[in-house]
């Protein structure tokens, strides 16, 4: 039997690495997630032979990296977490949140226990105040996760412009004073 015949949303042609090496349970979870979200999901990779951390679940075909289209990332995070809870998967999966991927996304794996983390590579969120690395490993609350969400770049620009304006204004006042 071909598990892909059972799926509503995904085909063998997605970026699974090798579709035959991906855990069928993981494929069914992704299909259910796609139905639950009612939004597109783009698969980045699943089964791999290299390119991940040494004991990665990707090497066993038990992990998938993906992003959700259309939804703001913070909303996608909330909805993915709600899905895991509603489907009784909460205590059985690893979920990594990657807010500064080119398109912010997720790592999901069937490790059989609950682990959550946020991985920041370049320190993009919160005006770069989040240091690069893995944050709140295993113990991420929803609040923790949300504090790592990327913000609107337009607000960043506004923030910098305001800071510069204020600096120039202060310098001006200072020069007036000593003049
Ligand atoms: Zn991954």
Image (cartoon, rainbow, N blue to C red):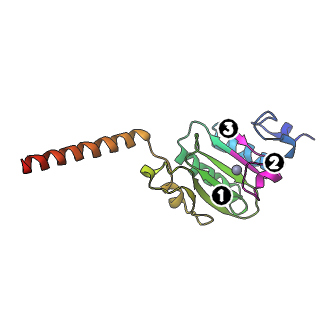
**Magenta stretch, residue numbers:** 44-65
Q: Which residue is mark 3?
A: 42
Mark 3 and mark 2: span between their CA atoms? 20 Å
> For the residue labelled by badge 1, is the local secondary structure a helix, a strand or a loop?
helix
Q: Are marks 1 and 3 in contact (CB under 8 Å)?
A: no
Q: Is residue 22 magenta?
A: no
**165 displayed left or right of 149:** left
> For the residue labelled by badge 3, is the local secondary structure a helix, a strand or a loop?
strand
> For the residue labelled by badge 2, is the local secondary structure a helix, a strand or a loop?
loop
Residue at 58% in and 46% down: 76
**Mark 1 closeness class: few <14, some 14–19, many ≥20 residues within 10 Å:** few
Say whether disc 1 or disc 3 marks the residue closer to the N-terminus.
Answer: 3
Q: Which residue is mark 1?
A: 85
Mark 1 and mark 3: span between their CA atoms? 22 Å
Name the foreground residue: 59 vs 87: 59
**Mark 2 closeness class: few <14, some 14–19, many ≥20 residues within 10 Å:** few
């Amino acid at each position: 039997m071909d598990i892909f015949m059972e799926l509503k949303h995904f085909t063998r042609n997605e970026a699974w690495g090798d579709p035959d090496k991906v855990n069928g349970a993981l494929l069914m979870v992704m299909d259910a997630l796609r139905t639950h979200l009612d939004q597109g999901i783009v698969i980045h990779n699943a089964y791999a032979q290299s390119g991940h951390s040494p004991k990665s679940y990707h090497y066993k075909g038990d992990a998938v990296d993906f992003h959700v289209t259309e939804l703001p990332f913070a909303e996608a995070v909330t909805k993915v977490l709600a899905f895991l809870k509603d489907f009784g998967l909460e205590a059985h999966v690893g979920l990594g949140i990657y807010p500064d991927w080119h398109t912010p996304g997720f790592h999901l794996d069937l490790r059989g226990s609950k682990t959550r983390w946020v991985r920041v590579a370049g320190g993009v969120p919160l005006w770069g105040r989040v240091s690069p690395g893995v944050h709140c490993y295993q113990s991420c609350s929803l609040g923790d996760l949300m504090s790592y969400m990327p913000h609107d770049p337009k607000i960043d620009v506004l923030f910098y412009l305001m800071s510069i304006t204020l600096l120039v204004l202060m310098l001006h006042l200072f020069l007036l004073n000593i003049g």
